[in-house]
Structure formats: C-alpha cells, structure tokens
Image (cartoon, rainbow, N blue to C red):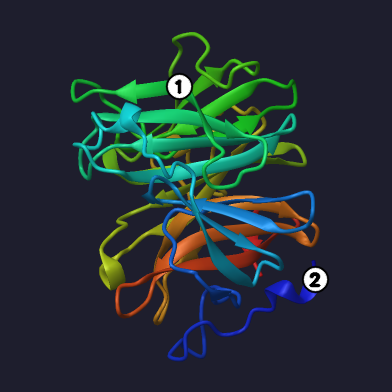
Amino acid sequence: MLVVALTLTTAVATAPQASAYPLPGRVTGDISVHDPSAVRRADGSYLVAHTGTNIALKTSADRIAFRDAGSAFPGGTPWATSYTNGGNNLWAPDLSYRDGRYWLYYSASTFGSNRSAIFLATSTTGNAGTWTHRGLVVESRTSDDFNAIDPDLVVDDQGRWWLSFGSFWSGIKMIALDPSTGLRSGTSLRSLAGRGGGPIEAPTIVKRGAFYYLFVSFDHCCRGAASTYRVVVGRSSSVTGPYVARDGTALTSGGGTEVLAGQGSVHGTGHQDVLADVDGDVLLYHYYTDSGASRLGINLLAYDSAGWPFLR
C-alpha cells in the first residue's frame, strides 16, 4: 500500500477555511457506508463491513478506491428476524482477523428498541457468502436497562477476549468471551461508560502503549445533515476500566475527550473503528453530506506527548 493513500484532500468543496479537525481523507468509488469496520488483509488489500442488507461488504486495494463486495449472508439470517421484525437490515458490524479466521460480530434490532441481539459469524476468506453462523452472543429485552447493539471485540494483554457494546439506556457494557468459541463466557456485565440515559453508543477499544483507549460516539446519529454524532475518547490502564477523559472525568459519569465532530458540510461524524495499518492508526467512521447521504470517512490517528489521540 502506498503511504500517500491518505493524503488529506478536501472531501467537500464547501468546507470552512478554518476548522477544528482535518477533513475526511480522499476516498472514491462505492463509499456510501454506515457504521464501518475494517481489516487489512494479508495481501495488503482492505475488507470493510458495514450496516446494510445482510451486512454489506466493500473492498479496496489502496484504502482510497472502494468497491461493493456483496453481503456476508446473501441467503439471509433467519436466526435474526425475531429482533428485526422480519427485516434483513443488520447493523454495526465489528470485523477482525484472528487465529486464521475473520470474526464478525453484528447487531439485530429495530430503531429505538432495546429488544436487540448480537451474533457472531466466522469465515476463512471474509468473502460474501462464506460466513458461518456461530450463534447468539448476547441479547437485551425491553425489561433490561441496556441495549445489545454496536459490538466491539478486544483481546487484552493476557489474551482474554472481551466484547463491549451498547447504545443509550445505561450506556456501554462489557462481557467476557470464550476465546475458543468467541461466544459469551459467564454472566458478568460490566459498565464502561454512560450519560444517564443520554446518547452514547458505538464503543471501540484499542491498546496503545500503557493504556486501553475507549472511543465512543456521543449525540445523535441517523438524521442526515441534522445528525450531531461526534467521537470522544477515554483511557484506562485496565481493559475493564475505569475509563477517564483527559480532564479526569469518568466516562461512567458522562466524561469524554472529543476527537472528532462535524464541521462545514461534514455532518454527524461517528460510529468509529480504529485500524492499525502500515502507516499508523487509522480512524474510520461515517458522516453525512449536506444532502443527507452517508459517506465513509478516513483519517490518520496520532497521539500527543501526553498519550491522547488526535486526528491528522
């Protein structure tokens, strides 16, 4: 891959001259995405999974030009329809590659409901139609105070597997997974972040240096150009927390250090994923244009002298 693949070329012509954050890097082709997650494959190409019919897939050879690659489950997901009112729109996948397999955690729900579920599938190639259903990981019911959507897998320094997830309600949760199956281990449910029932979702956890970093999306998605989504972060020396913002406020008390927000004609930046690439960490996310269309956003991610991430 060319290191110049992420030159921060203006993505929207009407962007302001002075801005708080870099504009999305140049991407072309089929870039209509929502809730993206990506891996870099052994051949140097990229595979992206995102919200869509039966989980939509895209590929790229250079992290600039993207093309449609079908869906993970072209035959449908009958095991999920009781959570989607019979629909086939599946949400917020988390894509990773470990132990010779691609792992795909994804959500089934309906808008505004916490009658939701997270499922797991695996594939040896990641290609459309090659994914094997591995089962239900965690679900939430209307009587629960959490919402089982927006999964993110993290493996800690001890080799333990964890899944964070959550949207609104009581915030971001974490459960332990069995590394041999990828499914839930035990019944413990930990709290990582929350805003007293307010808008918080889409956790992403990565370990860099001495800290685990928890990225989440604050405020409102899915309103087109009126979306107010933004990305914030906290960090902890332990994967299970407590996570705190730069100012010391706990994320369980609504804290979060802003990393990215909308500006000019880039609206509602959020549902981020962090990809470790050959030229450093990359933040992927979606945003909305003035017309309300969702688009893939990509920026390089760096860390300041105090160890806090920022876009470049």
> Residue 119's x, y, as percent?
43, 29
C-alpha span from label 2 to label 1: 39 Å
Q: Secondary structure at mark 2?
A: helix
Q: Does any portion of residue 127 appear in the rendered image?
A: yes
Instruction: Please name the residue shown 33% across and 40% down the image.
Output: 195
| Quarter the C terminus occupies | bottom right
Residue on which the image places disc 2: 3
Image quarter of residue 102: top right
Contact? badges 2 and 1 (CB < 8 Å)? no
Residue 272 higher or lower than 148, as above or below: below
> Residue 122's x, y, as percent?
58, 32
Q: Nearer the viewer, residue 277 or 263?
A: 277
Q: Nearer the viewer, residue 122 or 229?
A: 122
Q: Viewed as shown, does residue 187 lie left or right of 81?
A: right
> Dot 1: within a 10 Å radius of its alpha carbon, few (fewer than 14), some, or many (20 or more) residues?
some
Residue 186 higher or lower than 20, as above or below: above
Looking at the rendered structure, the kind of residue marked 2 is Val
Instruction: Please name the residue shown 42% across and 70% down the image.
Output: 262
Q: Viewed as shown, does residue 112 lie left or right of 310?
A: left
Residue on which the image places disc 1: 135
Looking at the rendered structure, the kind of residue marked 1 is Gly
Instruction: Please name the residue shown 43% across and 18% down the image.
Output: 189
Q: Nearer the viewer, residue 297 or 103?
A: 103
| Quarter the N terminus occupies | bottom right
Q: Does any portion of residue 309 appear in the rendered image?
A: no
Q: Earlier in the sequence, mark 2 or mark 1?
A: 2
Q: Viewed as shown, does residue 33 lie left or right of 235?
A: left
> Residue 174's x, y, as percent?
48, 26
